[in-house]
């Protein structure tokens, strides 16, 4: 099964968090699991905040890209379209809110689970939770906005 990010058009697959064309990025992969979306990510030693714990900015980045990927997949699903159909849905972050529930240990594979809270026009609201060894360590909400056609590098 292909991840949501595998369907991103070549010219829009460079994001540090989720772009397959960014060799230095996280290159997260997100999938449907029932009505939720799931991403697994293995933090590396350079993601350390203090010895033994993950840097909070990494968690925010994972929630952000998990949320925008979930938004795209949810929009395809809402329109009963396959993810390889055109025009492509791509989303950017309009708002990102993260609550850190407890320190996230460095070592275990992190699981990010997302739920679509609302689809309204070109806006999708996604709630995402980060888990380490089954324990919720961060909770986020992403307000994802459908990327306008004019949003290109000049």
Image: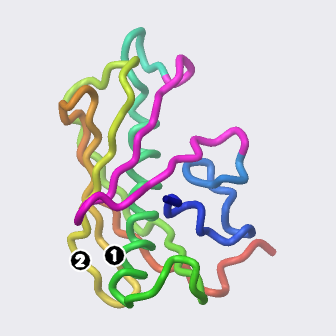
Q: Where in the figure is residue 38, as x and y percent of width and height?
A: 34, 51
Separation (CA) of disc 1 from disc 2: 6 Å
Q: Residue furthest right?
A: 154
Which residue shows up at 60% across the image and 89% down it?
A: 87
Label 2 environment density (alpha carbons within 10 Å; few <14, some 14–19, many ≥20): some
Say which of 133 and 99 sits in front: 133
**Residue 30, quarter of the rendered image:** bottom left
Question: Which residue matches tag 2?
Answer: 118
Query: Label 1 crowding class (10 Å Cα cut-off): few <14, some 14-19, many 20+?
Result: many
Circles 1 and 2: CB distance less than 8 Å? yes
In the picture, the quarter occupied by the C terminus is bottom right
Q: In front here: 33 or 40?
A: 33
- Residue 63's spot in the image, x, y percent? 38, 49
Name the residue furthest top. Answer: 51
Magenta stretch: give its range: 23-47
Is 132 placed left or right of 75 in the picture? left
Which secondary structure lies at badge 2? strand
Q: Residue at x 40, y 86 (%)?
A: 122
The image's mark for residue 124 is 1
Question: Residue 117, image x and y in percent?
Answer: 21, 70
Dividing the picture into quadrants, the one containing residue 59 is top left
- Residue at horizontal 45 percent and vertical 87 percent from the top: 81
Check the image and name the residue furthest to the front.
1
User: Is residue 109 toward the left or the right of residue 99 in the image?
Assistant: right
Magenta run includes residue 28: yes
Q: Is residue 148 above or below residue 53?
A: below
Magenta residue check for 144: no
Q: Earlier in the sequence, mark 1 or mark 2?
A: 2
Residue at 43% x, 27% y is: 55
């Amino acid at each position: 099964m292909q991840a949501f990010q595998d369907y991103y058009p070549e010219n829009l697959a460079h994001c540090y968090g989720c772009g397959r064309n960014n060799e230095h990025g996280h290159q997260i992969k997100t999938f449907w699991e029932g009505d939720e979306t799931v991403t697994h990510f293995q933090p590396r030693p350079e993601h350390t905040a203090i010895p033994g714990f993950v840097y909070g900015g990494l968690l925010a980045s994972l929630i952000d890209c998990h949320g925008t990927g979930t938004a795209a997949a949810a929009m395809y699903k809402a329109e009963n379209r396959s993810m390889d159909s055109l025009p492509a849905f791509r989303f950017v972050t309009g708002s990102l809110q993260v609550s850190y529930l407890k320190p996230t240990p460095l070592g275990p594979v992190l699981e990010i689970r997302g739920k679509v809270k609302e689809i309204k026009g070109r806006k999708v609201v996604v709630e995402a939770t980060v888990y380490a060894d089954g324990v919720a360590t961060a909770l986020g909400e992403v307000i994802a906005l459908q990327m306008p056609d004019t949003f290109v590098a000049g």
